[in-house]
Image (cartoon, rainbow, N blue to C red):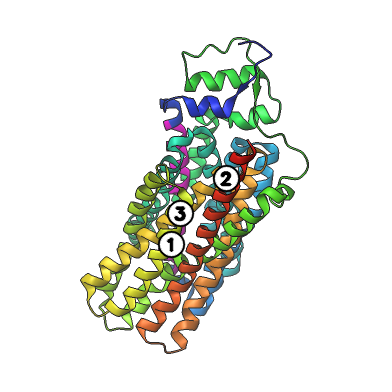
Amino acid sequence: MPASQPLNVTAFIDRQPLSAFQVTIVVLCFLIVAIDGFDTAAIGFIAPAIRADWQLSPAHLAPLFGAGLAGLMAGAFLFGPLADRYGRKRILIFSVLFFGVASLASAWSGELWELIALRFLTGLGLGGAMPNTITLTSEFCPEKRRSFLVTTMFCGFTLGSALGGLASAGLIEAYGWRSVLVVGGVMPLVLAVVLVRLLPESVRYLVMTGAEPARVVATLQRIAPAADLCGATFTVSERPVGSPARHLFKPELLRGTLLFWLTFFMSLLVIYLLSSWLPTFLRSTGMSLRTAALVTTMFQVGGTVGAIALGWLMDRFNPRFVLAGSYALAGVFIAAIGNLADAPVAAGVAVFLAGFCISGSQVGANALSAGFYPTDCRATGVSWANGVGRMGSVVGSVGGATMMSMGLGMPTLFALVGIPALIAGATMLSFGLMHSVTARKQLVAG
């Protein structure tokens, strides 16, 4: 390839069929997110055993859950800019090692406040790992299949959550609650060794930061072995200038950044409120504990199916309008739960559809944010959107208790819970209209 015609690596990847090398990257990121899901679910299952072991009141457990969420938020804000500056692979592996060591250390906690501190550190590592898996997967996937592959990868979280629940029950009974934390620490440490060997650095990042062409060639030829890249020079559309965090507020990105932040805040508020309080809401109607648990499980099942289905739709239609419609439907189905709470089967269907729309849309929003931001600030953009979203998760986790104390009827309560989903739909609609206007102006100018 003549030196006067540098090869744009983004366009090169978009032109290639999906390779086994790219599938391997998706699988590795899937495993990272699955371990995240395992850890998130496991702490809820071991909390009763910790309470019994240390003779704690329910109020003592609140900081334990809050510390993990605070760590997730801080990790998202901290590690995103670091990944844009020092590389996705390096920061991702560091994050996995960090939360592995912190989880392992948690198993030897001698008192509650020591465990709370270590849960914060575990969340810090997890908060850095999750957004960077989205960024790395996105940068290796061809555009026409990106949404589907990113959302499928992110389904590892729900699978890991299910595994965390199943494994915790057996481990606690056989070896005590500390064994769950040991497993949650050993798994990421083992995976980190695999990541060092198999996970590549983002080829877009390598070109953007001026890495040796031989490294770029070696990576691209694993995607397209037959490509003749001898003597090629490479380019990307962006070059890093200044702080990645400042780039989020450039005129062409500012409005999108704020719309993503509002969407993530509202979406995660609803998801964490329902995940934390739905069994309690349903139990208050007289539903049995077993039935309430089964109905609540449909929320996670719906989220997994929704993530895959919406990812497929986002690759074929305008993804902003797909998400706008899905979030709006989520508000409708969430409100419907309150009117069907005395009919378990119907309530289960409504919960499934609510999970399909709200959790599936949140995964889709992660994929969309990775496509919106340029390479020079992509990790920061995805991470900070998740960080703002974690603020919403804290509000949702606390808000359930406030709503219960107000003595609201189930129809009113679930109607209120559905409002943030409608707001998320409105922000995505606004984002879609903004993008359409910008694209039309560019077409006219061209």
Q: Quadrant of the N terminus?
A: top right
N-term mark: 1 or 3: 3
Q: Secondary structure at mark 2?
A: helix
Q: Which residues are magenta?
A: 23-48
Residue 251 image point, x, y percent: 71, 50
Give the label on residue 327, or none: 1
Determine whether, in the image, residue 278 is placed left or right of residue 403: left
User: CB atoms at circles 1 and 3 under 8 Å apart?
Assistant: no
Give the amino acid at mark 1. Tyr
* Residue at the image position 44 percent from the left and 50 percent from the top: 183
10 Å crowding of disc 1: few (<14), some (14-19), many (20+) = many
Foreground residue, 303 or 200? Answer: 303
The residue that disc 3 covers is 321
* Residue at the image position 60 percent from the left and 22 percent from the top: 216
10 Å crowding of disc 2: few (<14), some (14-19), many (20+) = few
Camera-side mark, 2 or 1: 2
Give the amino acid at mark 3. Phe
N-term mark: 2 or 1: 1
10 Å crowding of disc 3: few (<14), some (14-19), many (20+) = some
The residue that disc 2 covers is 440
Determine whether, in the image, residue 441 is placed left or right of residue 396: right
Residue 169 visible, this orientation:
yes
Asked if the magenta segment contains residue 95, the reply would be no
Camera-side mark, 1 or 3: 3
